[in-house]
Image (cartoon, rainbow, N blue to C red):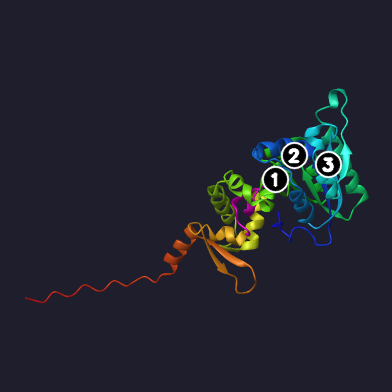
């Protein structure tokens, strides 16, 4: 989470956080089956601070149910307003979705200073909300679990973070378990796909990360146990060459496969020596 792309979110932006706690609780229990507390206080704290000044914080659930009510204290300690979800008749399934969507649209209208919407949800039904927020120029970050995240929702967000990765950042005991869910080969394929769209053979590290997020909003170097994007790229020597950019604090990257033809083209050709004349008899 701390790896949020600051270039995409203005420093003066206010942040609004909306948590579908029921969806998160069910998915977190599946993602972290051995954890007594799959939604720890410190993970909620990290969630609320990593994208700037979080001025609006709301969590939605039927708090009368013990499987959700157990998290009320941690949420309240993090400044969350707890919204009761009451269900009647046919609207039982989508009650939290509707409440969150209505509140998010209200914030869009009444708080124009909110530039980043952080939606903790995995249901694909939130996709129209995300698209409408982005239509108004808002940066939308989704957060969910591997178990319950809809591929449709992931695809329409600017960024999508996995809850297990956030928990692993504050609880080292689960890092190996969380990291086992991610394959480094997926990063290699994403890097190659991004670099194939670069205007030149080389690109800056910031350009590469931005392009990777555009291709896959769920990309996050912390999914793979890397503390920074630079550290992750250093683990891909068979795919990328990484150099310091002399003109800035950024780095320059080049596909290893692209470097070989360039070297061959730059290498001067050796002239063939003329054949030695045969002595006359």
Range shown magenta: 216-228
Q: CA distance from mark 1 to mark 2?
A: 8 Å
Main SS type for the magenta part? Answer: loop
Q: Is residue 95 left or right of residue 214?
A: right
| Number of disc labels | 3
Query: In what element is the residue under mark 3?
Result: helix
| First reached walking from the N terminus: tag 3 or tag 1 | 3
Residue 27 lies, with reference to residue 133, above or below; the image says above
Q: Kindly indicate the quadrant of the structure image that contains residue 65.
A: top right
Circles 1, 2 touching at the beta carbon (< 8 Å): yes
Circles 2, 3 touching at the beta carbon (< 8 Å): no
* Foreground tag (2 vs 3): 3
Q: Kindly indicate the quadrant of the structure image that contains residue 37.
A: top right
- The residue labelled by disc 2 is 24
Q: Determine the residue positioned at 85% across, 46% down.
A: 76
- The residue labelled by disc 1 is 163
């Amino acid at each position: 989470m701390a790896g949020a792309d600051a270039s995409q979110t203005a420093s003066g932006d206010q942040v609004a956080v909306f948590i579908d706690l029921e969806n998160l609780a069910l998915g977190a229990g599946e993602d972290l089956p051995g954890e007594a507390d799959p939604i720890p206080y410190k993970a909620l704290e990290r969630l609320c601070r990593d994208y700037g000044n979080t001025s609006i914080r709301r969590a939605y659930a039927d708090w009368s149910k013990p499987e959700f009510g157990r998290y009320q204290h941690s949420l309240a300690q993090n400044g969350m307003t707890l919204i009761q979800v009451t269900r009647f008749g046919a609207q039982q399934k989508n009650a939290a979705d509707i409440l969150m969507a209505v509140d998010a649209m209200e914030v869009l209208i009444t708080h124009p200073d909110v530039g980043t919407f952080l939606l903790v949800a995995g249901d694909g039904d939130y996709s129209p909300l995300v698209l409408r927020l982005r239509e108004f120029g808002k940066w939308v970050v989704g957060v969910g679990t591997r178990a319950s995240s809809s591929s449709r929702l992931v695809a329409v967000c600017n960024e999508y973070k996995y809850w297990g990765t956030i928990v692993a950042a504050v609880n080292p005991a689960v890092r190996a378990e969380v990291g086992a869910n991610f394959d480094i080969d997926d990063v290699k394929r994403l890097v190659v796909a991004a670099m194939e769209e670069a205007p030149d053979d080389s690109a800056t590290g910031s350009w590469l990360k931005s392009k990777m997020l555009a291709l896959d909003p769920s990309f996050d170097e912390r999914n793979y146990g890397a503390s920074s994007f630079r550290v992750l790229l250093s683990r891909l020597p068979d795919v990328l060459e990484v150099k310091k950019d002399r003109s800035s604090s950024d780095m320059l990257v080049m596909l290893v496969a692209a470097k070989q033809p360039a070297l061959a083209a730059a290498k001067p050709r050796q002239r063939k020596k003329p054949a030695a004349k045969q002595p006359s008899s």
